[in-house]
Image (tube, rainbow, N blue to C red):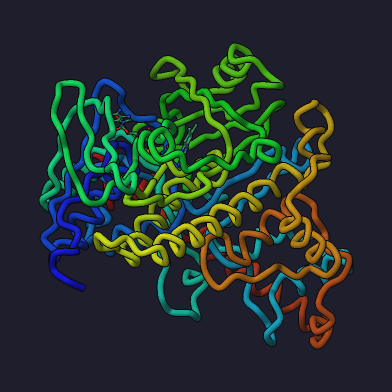
Amino acid sequence: MSQSALIKRILIVGGGTAGWMTAAAMGKLLAPLKIDVTLLESDQIGTVGVGEATLPHIRFFNRRLGIDEADFMAQTAATFKLGIEFRDWARKGDAYIHPFGDYGRDIKGVPFHHYWLRLRQRGRAWRIGEFSAPVMISEFGRFAMPVEDERSVMSSFSYAYQFDAGLYAKYLRRFAEACGVRRIEGKITTVIQRGEDGFIEAVKTEDGRRVEADLFVDCSGFRGLLIEQTLKAGFEDWSAVLPCDRAVAVPCENAAPSLPYTRATARGAGWQWRIPLQHRVGNGYVYCSEHVSDDEAAQTLMASLEGRPRAEPNFLRFRAGKRRRQWVKNCVSIGLSSGFLEPLESTSIYLIQASVTKLLELFPDRDFRACDIDEFNRAMDLEYERIRDFLILHYHATERDDTPFWDYVRTMKIPDSLAYKMTLFRKRGVVVKYKDGLFLHPSWIAVYLGQRVMPDMYDPRAEFIAEDELEKTLSAMRNLIRKTAESLPDHSDFIRRYCPAP
Ligand code: FAD
């Protein structure tokens, strides 16, 4: 590669979570290349201002950047998150936790849930959640750090964070600026493309400034200022299978000690989130506008708050789907500009991280080889499609027919890829395995079983152990997990000692 082909200037358009995560990663991890990284954002337009629940992968992102966890959590008023509790999804009155960790342990190379199914068929009424450390720790409202020693039940889980999105953006901004990222404030009014090939050459702001770059990262949010409005990447609309298209959000006071998990309660035309932070609780109703009005949705939300509201309700609109191509010419879209699959499993920040990581792996030079671009788009398509299937499962695996919304999602046509996975699990309890990416084996088990998708049979190899012995083994496992969970510090106390917000 000739020196003249090196990328010398990057412009990140947008200063929401996507923009600042990208800026922080590029500022830190590309430092040896001495690239000029600039972020341009508009105070006038602002950010979407939500996005407070995360997945465990964010810890690896932070670690790669060298971020100190306790400082990060204190500065963003964060709590720990061990999973998501789903209430009223398959039937009203049901509840289960999708934990960030394993169920039990495989025995003789057979996944644990087959043994659980075997005993269940013999009338043992243990919940699968009783074999999960993060479920039990969540239910007791406790927390302690996982350990590496594989003999301990405390090695069987991971955790994520619940944090204040506004404070998170500020934290990342400080971090990125300390790494040399330059910030410009201004509203882009014009995008200038090169005549010969349509590559983006520069953007112009309302006050007449022209900012040039070699690589543009579009983090401009739903509008997709560069990727869609300029480069016409196209949008794959998935709203037929993920029909929620609006949300109303409001923070409230934290009336009770903070729980180490997010709650998602099914409502008549969607679901409601509850995200406990150190200083407040984030709440929102994600709904389908075909089935409920904005006013009714806001009323439902406000009527179910567990503390006094701390702001006016904030209404948001979106459409489920993704850009047909997330990288076009010299522009890569990251964050909401690349797509959005509603916040049910808190996947957006993960997707930002996945895009940034992939972009760094395939970091281009000014030749912008088609193979790099194709590989980035292929990898991100796969991420989106897998998440889409997992989210649809929550809606489709329901027995609810009490409202037109639930009746629709219960009976809608689902993608073949998901139908295949569900059949395999229903017929013989097998989960389609992936080597990497999001939502591996335990996550699918959690949602299938939590939403009453019960396999017709279990793995015949689960018969290799005598029933008495199996019962004893599982009983001991269950007791150990319960005892361990009960003995841990209270989640709020742990936070007070480890990372109290200033
Ligand atoms: P934005 O925050 O919209 O930022 C866009 C930026 O672009 C802004 O800085 C804006 O000023 C700038 N900009 C736009 N146009 C111009 C212009 N013309 N000139 C200059 N600047 C411009 N994700 C999770 O992981 N967990 C969650 O729990 C979660 N909950 C969510 C709940 C809801 C209801 C919604 C809608 C989203 C949720 N998300 C969640 C997604 C998460 O909020 C976003 O992924 C995240 O905030 C990233 O947004 P962004 O940076 O892409 O866009």
Q: What residue do we see at 44% from left, 18% from top?
A: 309
Q: Position of residue 363 (x, y in %)?
A: 30, 63
Question: Does residue 235 appear anywhere in the picture?
Answer: yes
Q: Quadrant of residue 420?
A: bottom right
Q: Nearer the viewer, residue 98 or 417?
A: 417
Ligand 1 image-quadrant field? top left
Q: Position of residue 250 (x, y in %)?
A: 46, 23
Tell me: residue 108, above or below residue 338.
below
Q: Nearer the viewer, residue 101 or 292?
A: 292
Tell me: residue 209, above or below residue 475.
above
Q: What residue do we see at 21% from left, 36% from top?
A: 40
Tell me: residue 408, above or below residue 415.
above
Q: In the displayed image of the protein, which residue is found farthest to the top?
A: 295
Question: For the N terminus, which image quadrant?
Answer: bottom left
Q: In the displayed image of the protein, which residue is found farthest to the front?
A: 196
Q: What residue do we see at 59% from left, 31% from top?
A: 272
Q: Quadrant of residue 8?
A: bottom left
Q: Quadrant of residue 288?
A: top right
Question: Does residue 494 appear anywhere in the picture?
Answer: no
Give the side of residue 8 with respect to residue 368, left or right: left
Q: Position of residue 274 (x, y in %)?
A: 52, 34
Give the side of residue 292 with respect to residue 428, left or right: left
Q: Position of residue 439 (x, y in %)?
A: 57, 60
The number of callouts visible is 0
Question: For the C terminus, which image quadrant?
Answer: top left
Give the side of residue 71 with respect to residue 278, left or right: left
